[in-house]
Amino acid sequence: MIRIGIIIPANNAGIEYDLYNMPHNNMSFHFTRMRSTGGCEPKNINQFKNDLKSAFKMLEWSDLIVYGRTYGTHKNIDLIFDVLKNPIIPEISVKNFLNDNNYRSLFIGTPYIYERAQKEADYFSEYNVTGFFYMNRVYGIDISNINNDEIISMLRENSDKIEDSDAIYIACTALSTSNILNYIRDEFNRPVISENSAILYGIERSLDIDINIPGI
């Protein structure tokens, strides 16, 4: 049995459902939570480091550690890698997926407000971001309550931008999409990777195993 330790924010109510709803033969997921925080980057670096250490201490027996949130990853990635001993970072796994398949353009779907969605697009600026949507949600539980039909509707509204992309990326580990990834792939005729399915891609890549990841 492969044991995957996953660190998530306290108000994330989507990631656990998604991961258990996707293929995970001979694999178990073990979650612990960090305090919920506002913004994208920690203001108190020492507190952030201590929170990371506490979370890691509860999962250090795991075969792999996943840092299942975006918070801190854009400007404090070195600290996260150091404390968590080279964890899987979903956004980095998305980039690995794009690079491994030579995809150079993508459309991004997010549940965030416009400014936060723009930061997500900026993070992927090394690729041609053909567009992005945002759903004006701020709080984790509100994001986790988003209906799958609403996500598909937002994608359809942006079908012209999707046509110019090699792949679709749906951001945020609190946004549950496991039930619709294959549907999105088939309707828009291109691979789709979510921040949660990217965790499986990271596991597959790290352990050199095959996982039937939906959407790709």
Image (tube, helix red, strand yellow):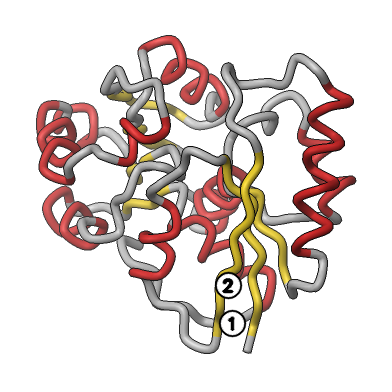
Q: Which mark is residue 204?
A: 2
Q: Relative to 116, is 55 above or below?
A: below
Q: Relative to 180, is 28 above or below?
A: below
Residue 76, image quadrant? top right
Numbered disc 1: secondary structure: loop
Q: Relative to 93, is 150 above or below?
A: above
| Residue 135 in the figure: left or right of residue 34 | left
Q: Split into 4 quadrants, where in the image is the N terminus?
A: bottom right
Q: Split into 4 quadrants, where in the image is the C terminus?
A: bottom left
* Residue 211 position in % (x across, y down): 47, 78
* Residue contact between numbered discs 2 and 1, judged by CB atoms under 8 Å: yes
**Residue found 74% across the figure and 72% down from its top:** 62
Numbered disc 2: secondary structure: helix
| Kind of residue at badge 2 | Glu
**Residue nearest the observer in this picture, 185 or 112:** 112
Q: Earlier in the sequence, mark 2 or mark 1?
A: 2
| Residue 182 in the figure: left or right of residue 209 | left
Q: Which residue is label 1 attached to?
A: 209
**Residue nearest the observer in this picture, 154 or 65:** 65
Residue 150, image quadrant? top left
Find the distance from the CA under tag 2 to the CA under tag 1: 5 Å
Residue 145, image quadrant? top left
**Residue found 36% across the figure and 35% down from its top:** 141
| Residue 200 in the figure: left or right of residue 75 | left
* Residue 90 position in % (x across, y down): 57, 49
| Kind of residue at badge 1 | Ile
